[in-house]
Amino acid sequence: MFRRASAVAALFLATTALAACSSGPDYPPPDLAAARAAVDGVDPETVNRYAAVEMREARSYLDQAEAAWRQENAEAAQRYATQALATVRLAEARADAAEARAAESDLQESLQSAPGATGTTTSPGLTGTTGMSPSGTGVDPSTIGTSGTGLTPTPVQPAPVPITPNGR
């Protein structure tokens, strides 16, 4: 009986030791899937236009991460996947910033070429034909909504009135 229990215990220990020495985890690192999704999910036209170098780097890191995973090197796969994910985020941020600068430039050009624009600054980033108002706000209230100013009134919504159970 003792021999049988010893044999079972030895077999269990050997199986456990072999399982511990097996080839790493059966699932890829979480950042590998996230990096793959991030690389595949970017707007290629925008990112390739404004951050092509960063996208090439991100794809290279992703390729290295996938190669490391196929070679069962989970640590390297995680490291390259993390780098790929960070580089994709950098590319997206640079592309977004470049798009914002381009939009700002387009807006400035359209404001400068607007009919009736004299270049008189009424507030930061806005030009108009009215100069300073008596109130010092930069816009003469009597010209709001009239042609030539480019300004239209914004409707004001009344604040909601809370209803209480007793009607007060």
Image (spheres, rainbow, N blue to C red):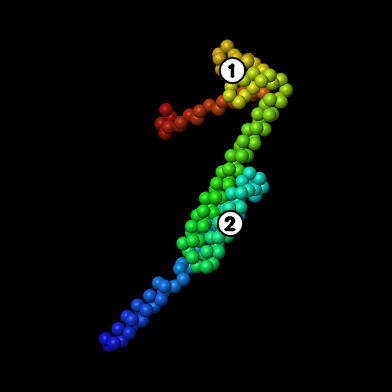
The quadrant the C terminus occupies is top left
Task: Place residue 165 in its image quadrant.
Answer: top left
Q: Residue 83 at x, y = what percent?
A: 51, 53
Callout 2: helix, strand or loop? helix
Which residue is pictured at 41% across the width and 31% down the height?
Answer: 166
**Residue 26, can we see it?**
yes
For badge 1, the amino acid type reads Gly
Residue 51, placed above or below residue 123: below
Q: Residues within 10 Å of mark 2 (few under 14, many from 20)?
A: some
Residue 150, placed above or below residue 40: above
Which residue is pictured at 73% across the width and 23% down the height?
Answer: 115
Which residue is pictured at 56% across the width and 43% down the height?
Answer: 93
Q: Residue furthest left?
A: 2
Task: Place residue 40 in its image quadrant.
Answer: bottom right
Q: CA distance from mark 2 to mark 1?
A: 53 Å
The quadrant the N terminus occupies is bottom left
Q: Residue 86 at x, y = what percent?
A: 52, 50
Sequence-earlier tag: 2 or 1: 2
Choose between 55 and 15: the one closer to the eye.
55
Residue 53, placed above or below residue 26: above
Q: Is residue 161 left or right of residue 97?
A: left
Q: Residue furthest right?
A: 115
Mark 2 sits on what residue? Answer: 60
Choose between 167 and 24: the one closer to the eye.
24
Choose between 31 and 161: the one closer to the eye.
31
Q: Residue 70 at x, y = what percent?
A: 54, 67
Q: Which mark is residue 138?
A: 1
Q: Residues within 10 Å of mark 1 (few under 14, many from 20)?
A: some
Callout 1: helix, strand or loop? loop
Q: Which mark is residue 27?
A: none
For badge 2, the amino acid type reads Ser
